[in-house]
Image (cartoon, grey):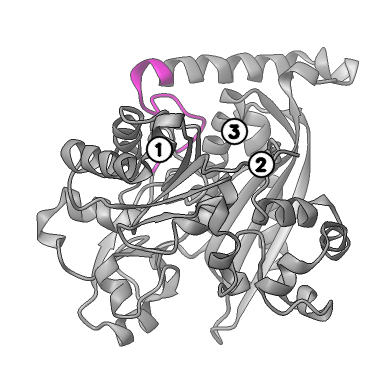
Amino acid sequence: MRKPDTIESLYLDFDGFFASVEQQARPSLRGKPIGIVPFDGTVHTVVIACSKEAKARGVKNVMHLGDAKKICPELVLVPQSPDLYRRAHNALLAEINSVIPVEAVKSIDELCCKLDPRDIADPQKLAANIKASIADGVGEYVTCSIGFAANRHLAKIACKMDKPDGVTIWHPKDMPIPLLPLPFDDIPGIGGRMEKRLQTSGIYNMEDFLNAQPKQMRKIWGNVTGERLWYALHGYDVKAEKSKRGMFGHGRVLPPKLRNFTDARDCSRILIVKAARRMRREGYYASTLYLWLSLRTNSQKETSWASKHKLHMANDDQACLSALDVLWIQAKARLPKTVRIVRLGITLGDLSPATSRQLDMLINDDPERQKWGALTSAMDSLNSRYGKSLVTMGLWKLPAGGNLGGKISFTRIPRAEDFW
């Protein structure tokens, strides 16, 4: 395994991405503490993301709205605008690519780049050029923090060291001193449970971690992930493993007026169709549909319910909607009529790529199945041609707040089709 003797990676993280994009687009929000919320009209929700002004007052991402307002009474609430964030992401990528090729987009607000010899010689100039390009092409209210290091993992940690709008350079010759004072929760790959497991093994801080042996990390993790993290933190060029698609799904917090069986079911139908569209675009079939409900009883007690239904390696709308109907019949039979459905989620799982799909001969020859598959393909073609949900199976009525299937996501970047 190669150990670079100079910086080779750049990691960029936008500062308060969703809030800063709102401030750039809406001058009236600039300089104010703002919190992005799913929709208007309820205090029973969370602040999905917040501006640097709100963070300076103690507000955090994914904080309950009531707690956030106690800390910061002047917090300005802004309903999410996912399509605005998607368009801003694409514009920002174009500006960065004009300065340095983007190697990988890690999320809607994070990316990484490989450095060439000229960049390695003057990383400060490269960072300044990127920031200037963003300010000129998108706007000065969208800022970013940048980290440089020998590998992507160290650069990701470095870019968090001087937020907002900072630049941190960790040369291999200076390592591992910058890592030693960091708590475990500053290290990507070490969560709360793993921290407890490390402490049980006598590893209480980063110095203990770095002085351990890689095989010991493999044993603690129970797989090669711990060993790979050890090598990454020691500055080795650890290649990221290619992730495999495991599911397609969507979730939604429901507005207060829609927290009943009828409206929740209608929302879930739109979510399953949008998930199935994504699955077809990427060339997969699903064998299982999962439905999950977060519930609130009359006593305000939080509980949940979940079930699954078998699909026969399907991806057409009719098969997915029929399976969803079965799950809602189960839910209505097993849950009290007075229960309120606060959140719901649907997942298409047990995926098979279209190129390796194997079907039972009788199912594959079923004329009814072929008919629904052809009909779904025709609907996809019409909707793609006109850029909207022109043809759908059943009612297509978005709830208050809209954005079903196109909401804020820190891990997935929505496409224009997600907002049809």
Residue 332, x across and y down, in percent: 66, 61
Q: Is residue 84 left or right of residue 118?
A: left
Instruction: Tell me which amino acid carries mark 1.
Output: Ala
Q: Earlier in the sequence, mark 3 or mark 1?
A: 1
User: Magenta stretch: residue 169 in it?
Assistant: no
| Tally of numbered tags | 3
Secondary structure predominantly adopted by residues drawn in magenta: loop
Give the residue at x 34% y 18%. 386
The nearer-to-camera label among 3 and 1 is: 1
Give the residue at x 56% y 87%. 299
Marks 3 and 2, how far apart at CA: 38 Å
Give the residue at x 30% y 82%. 69
Q: Which residue is mark 2?
A: 237
- Contact? badges 2 and 1 (CB < 8 Å): no
User: Magenta stretch: residue 385 in it?
Assistant: yes
Numbered circle sitting on residue 121 = 1
Instruction: Tell me which amino acid carries mark 2.
Output: Asp
Instruction: Write the start and end of the magenta stretch as one range.
Output: 384-397
Taking the image as drawn, is residue 196 in sight? yes
Residue 29, x across and y down, in percent: 15, 61
Residue 419, x across and y down, in percent: 38, 37
Mark 3 closeness class: few <14, some 14–19, many ≥20 residues within 10 Å: many
Q: Which residue is mark 3?
A: 276
Instruction: Tell me which amino acid carries mark 3.
Output: Ala
| Secondary structure of the residue carrying numbered label 1 | helix
Image quadrant where one finds the C terminus: top left
Marks 2 and 1, how far apart at CA: 19 Å
| Secondary structure of the residue carrying numbered label 2 | loop
Mark 2 closeness class: few <14, some 14–19, many ≥20 residues within 10 Å: many
